[in-house]
């Protein structure tokens, strides 16, 4: 978790970006993704200018409807995150939202979120649901608004800029123990989706809950993600992007880069710190540094980089 | 007629008390606090209405693994109820935090 703390500072975020831009860390054939984490706290025009042309921006855990002490104004911090993205000198073609759009899956929350998203200059948004988006008894509110892209399954794929994107759902099956589950049907679909694709195609795989085990006692992982990794390993450049834990955690395993994004709503404690993964109350002046988005940037030599930005 | 009125009132009062007593006997409560269902296992008689009351800062749900009952998100200070008419053992989980599990035993 020490690496994690460093990434919370603006200096480290910019350092990470420069490193990714230099192309030395991930000098692998084909496109390579490096995360650049944009804290709202670091949203100066010069910092944004250095991000370069983003392929897409990841927004996560907006939790519209949350109103507790950890952040009584989540609509306000989402609006500031959107301002941050809109202020980038080159606009991303896509926005990817990795779930927990809402806090309680209520229609008014989805409507408020949609209204705020409509202010984004980038017009194409792709989503996957978080467990907070599917907590209505009928599990209809998310799917009636965002289900079309996936034929109401929730998982789907698409291509953009030579990159193959795969959106997955790991919040709809509940195994006691708490880890996320993809399920056999979805795993079979992934196998079919990736079959015949060239190993040099850069992949972006995104889902709400982490697709690797970060902390099992809090359910920060996906129980059957091993079968997914078996499918991804042959590809030269894979970026696995998740949300759920409201903080940046990352690791590299072979050609697979794992990265979780910050929330735009409220931070959560580091793994195992305190009684559980609830909202973390921090002094108001610190909040913006712990909220933000991740920008994925195409660097020279056809490599890609990710940037996380916070709100202050 | 005048003499009768108090008698009816007394009868009504007695009936009301009896009703309240039987209602009390046929209701059960699970409190949700600190990411736990308390008690984890609740044993009730058939016909009991069980209420899950959320006293946490976080929303939770109650989801039966057989699909018999399923709440929407229960926010802080809200509750969800379900009446158990058939004896059996009913497991449930919070879909937002699936490590939260509990059981209702209906006798
Ligand atoms: Cu819960």
Image (cartoon, helix red, strand yellow):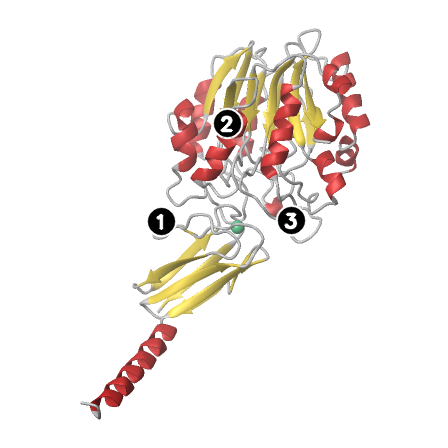
Above or below, B8 against A164 in this view is: below
The C terminus of chain A lies in quadrant: top right
Label 2 to label 3: alpha-carbon separation: 27 Å
Dot 2: element: strand
Q: Is residue A207 shown above or below A22?
A: below
From the image, tell me which residue sits under label 2.
A127
Write the residue at 47% across / 44% down: A174
Q: Residue at x 54, y 30 (%)?
A: A207
Figure label count? 3
Q: Return the residue at label 3.
A: A69
A114 relative position to A286: left or right: left
Q: Is residue A12 left or right of residue A195?
A: right
Label 3's element?
Answer: loop
Residue A57 visible: yes
Please state which of the two labelled residues, at mark 2 or mark 3, is closer to the viewer: 3
Q: Chain of mark 3?
A: A
> Residue A220 location in percent, x, y?
60, 41
The answer to whether mark 1 is within 8 Å of ligand 1 is: no
């Amino acid at each position: 978790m020490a690496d994690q703390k460093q990434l919370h500072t603006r200096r480290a975020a910019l350092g990470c970006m420069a490193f990714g831009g230099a192309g030395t860390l991930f000098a692998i054939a084909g496109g390579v993704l490096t995360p650049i984490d944009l804290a709202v706290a670091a949203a100066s025009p010069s910092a944004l200018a250095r991000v370069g042309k983003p392929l897409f921006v990841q927004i996560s855990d907006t939790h519209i409807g949350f109103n507790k002490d950890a952040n009584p104004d989540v609509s306000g911090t989402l609006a500031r995150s959107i301002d941050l993205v809109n202020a980038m000198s080159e606009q991303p073609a896509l926005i990817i939202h990795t779930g927990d759009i809402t806090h309680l899956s209520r229609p008014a929350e989805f409507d408020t979120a949609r209204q705020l998203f409509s202010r984004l200059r980038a017009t194409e948004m792709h989503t996957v649901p978080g467990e907070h988006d599917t907590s209505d008894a009928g599990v209809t509110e998310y799917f009636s608004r965002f289900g079309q892209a996936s034929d109401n399954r929730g998982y789907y794929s698409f291509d953009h800029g030579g990159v193959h994107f795969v959106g997955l759902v790991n919040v709809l099956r509940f195994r006691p123990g708490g880890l996320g589950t993809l399920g056999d049907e979805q795993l079979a679909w992934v196998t079919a989706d990736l079959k015949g694709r060239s190993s040099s195609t850069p992949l972006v795989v995104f889902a709400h809950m982490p697709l690797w085990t970060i902390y099992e006692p809090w359910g920060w992982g996906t129980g059957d993600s091993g079968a997914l990794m078996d499918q991804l390993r042959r590809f030269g450049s894979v970026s696995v992007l998740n949300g759920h834990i409201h903080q940046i955690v990352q690791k590299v395993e072979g050609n697979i880069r794992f990265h979780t994004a910050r929330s735009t709503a409220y931070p959560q404690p580091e793994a195992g710190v305190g009684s559980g993964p609830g909202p973390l109350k921090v002094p108001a002046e610190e909040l913006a540094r712990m909220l933000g988005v991740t920008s994925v940037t195409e660097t020279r030599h056809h490599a890609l980089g990710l940037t996380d930005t916070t709100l202050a | 007629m005048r003499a009768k009125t108090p008698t009816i009132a007394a009868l009504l009062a007695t009936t009301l008390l009896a009703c309240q007593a039987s209602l009390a006997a046929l209701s059960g409560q699970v409190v949700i606090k600190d990411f736990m269902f308390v008690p984890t296992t609740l044993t009730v008689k058939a016909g009991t209405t069980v209420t899950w009351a959320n006293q946490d800062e976080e929303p939770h749900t109650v989801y039966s693994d057989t699909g018999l009952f399923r709440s929407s998100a229960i926010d802080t200070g809200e509750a969800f109820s379900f009446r158990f008419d058939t004896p059996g053992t009913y497991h449930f989980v919070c879909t937002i935090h699936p490590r939260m599990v509990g059981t209702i035993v209906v006798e």
